[in-house]
């Protein structure tokens, strides 16, 4: 089951020439700097933009095809939309806003009570939008979109107008949506933190073109992609909790055939998680060190080395099992360790440097 997008559109400042095919399962994140074409791509999928040349298909259903003259109207595409501003009806209560999404919705499996529980809205139903925080308003907007029984939920930077505290409030709800309702999500952002927490599939867009598209865990460990040059660059390992050691205040994760020790987690063994490992926190070594505080010494193989001239640094891609890490080191370190594709290497990572996120 796939989302297939191909379109071309000329604007005054930019020509978009977008093409990608991604699985519809989970969350697909469109990532890139402001003005690169992310929102226009979402608009083309939702039918808000009618490109001069396009073909857009979701799970075998063609929504637009200029070659045959087909263009399905936005209201018939069954795509739930959530924007930067909540766009709630100010004269309606939260419950009335939510039920508005049900009015013209086709029969579906997403129930009112389930959405209220999933988004934590039970205590807000009698209130009006002006009495809600920004994060609460966005949760209501998401709920209204879900209750329209969409085949796909499209979200255009829904957290960009929120402060850090409100973002932290909403992000766990967004993470739970990925699998709780088995609903495909197309998500636009320029925030790497949201990529780390939400993306199953990643589409990197720059200046109106798709740079690369694929599994987020794979693309985030690629040293040759522009995303690796961000200050917050990090690999995200798909992992599961193996065991806890309360006496040592540590939890063991298994990721890519390797074991990682992280601070004690509040989740049972077997829980699927994501382990975010910042590139700046990975130390590379040719030999195992002795008598040091860090717990994680991981055997790996260098897959690639890319110079980062702006930071006078190098980005090293390291394969560990069937996954990968990214390390930012000095060019001198590359020379001293003779790092090159195929070189065996040890990746040293502090337990405290690994952020464990919901899987």
Image: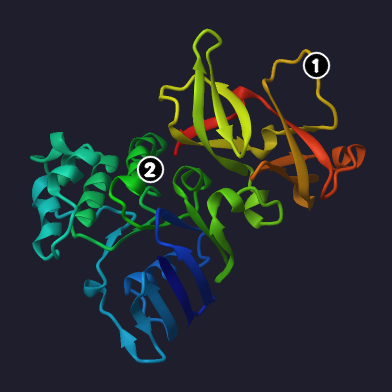
Against 176, is 229 above or below?
below
Image location (x, y in percent) of residue 16: 52, 76
Q: Which residue is at the front of the view, 244 or 112?
A: 244
Label 1 CA crowd tier, 10 Å (few <14, some 14–19, many 20+) = few
Residue 134: image quadrant is top left
Image location (x, y in percent) of residue 233: 62, 44
Residue 33 visible, this orientation: no
Residue ID at (51%, 26%): 242
Image location (x, y in percent) of residue 97: 13, 52
Foreground disc of the pair 1, 2 = 1
Which labelled disc corresponds to residue 247?
A: none
Q: CA distance from mark 1 to mark 2?
A: 39 Å
Residue ID at (84%, 43%): 343
Q: Secondary structure at mark 2?
A: helix
Circles 1, 2 touching at the beta carbon (< 8 Å)? no
Q: How is the image coloured?
A: rainbow
- Residue for badge 2: 175
- Check the image and name the residue furthest to the top: 247
Q: Secondary structure at mark 1?
A: loop
Label 2 CA crowd tier, 10 Å (few <14, some 14–19, many 20+) = some
Q: Earlier in the sequence, mark 1 or mark 2?
A: 2
Residue ID at (74%, 38%): 300
Q: Which residue is at the front of the view, 2 or 196?
A: 2
- Residue for badge 1: 290
Image location (x, y in percent) of residue 95: 10, 46
């Amino acid at each position: 089951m796939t989302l297939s997008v191909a379109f071309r559109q000329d604007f005054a400042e930019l020509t978009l020439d977008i093409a990608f095919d991604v699985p519809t399962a989970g969350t697909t994140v469109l990532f890139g700097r402001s003005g690169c074409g992310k929102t226009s791509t979402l608009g083309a999928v939702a039918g808000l933009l009618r490109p001069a040349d396009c073909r857009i298909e979701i799970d075998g259903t063609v929504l637009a095809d200029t070659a045959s003259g087909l263009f399905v109207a936005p209201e018939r595409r069954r795509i739930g939309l959530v924007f930067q501003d909540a766009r709630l009806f100010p004269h309606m209560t939260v419950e009335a806003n939510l039920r508005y999404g049900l009015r013209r919705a086709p029969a579906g499996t997403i129930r009112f009570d389930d959405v209220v529980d999933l988004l934590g809205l039970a205590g807000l139903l009698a209130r009006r939008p002006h009495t809600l925080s920004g994060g609460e308003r966005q949760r209501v907007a998401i709920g209204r979109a879900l209750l329209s029984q969409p085949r796909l939920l499209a979200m255009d930077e829904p957290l960009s107008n929120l402060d850090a505290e409100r973002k932290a409030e909403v992000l766990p709800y967004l993470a739970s949506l990925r699998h709780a309702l088995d609903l495909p999500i197309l998500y636009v952002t320029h925030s790497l933190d949201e990529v780390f927490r939400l993306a199953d599939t990643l589409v990197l867009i720059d200046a109106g073109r798709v740079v690369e598209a694929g599994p987020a865990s794979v693309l985030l460990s690629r040293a040759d992609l522009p995303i690796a040059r961000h200050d917050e660059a990090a690999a995200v390992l798909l992992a599961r909790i193996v065991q806890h050691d309360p006496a040592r205040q540590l939890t063991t994760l298994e990721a890519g055939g390797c074991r990682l020790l992280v601070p004690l987690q509040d989740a049972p063994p077997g829980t699927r998680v994501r382990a975010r490992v910042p590139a700046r926190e990975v130390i590379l070594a040719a030999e195992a060190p002795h008598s040091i505080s860090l717990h994680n010494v991981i055997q790996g193989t260098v897959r690639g080395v890319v110079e980062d001239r702006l930071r006078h640094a190098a980005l090293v891609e390291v394969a560990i099992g069937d996954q990968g890490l990214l390390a930012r080191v000095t060019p001198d370190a590359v020379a001293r360790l003779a790092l090159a594709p195929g070189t065996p290497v040890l990746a040293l990572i502090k337990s405290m440097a690994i952020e464990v996120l919901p899987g």
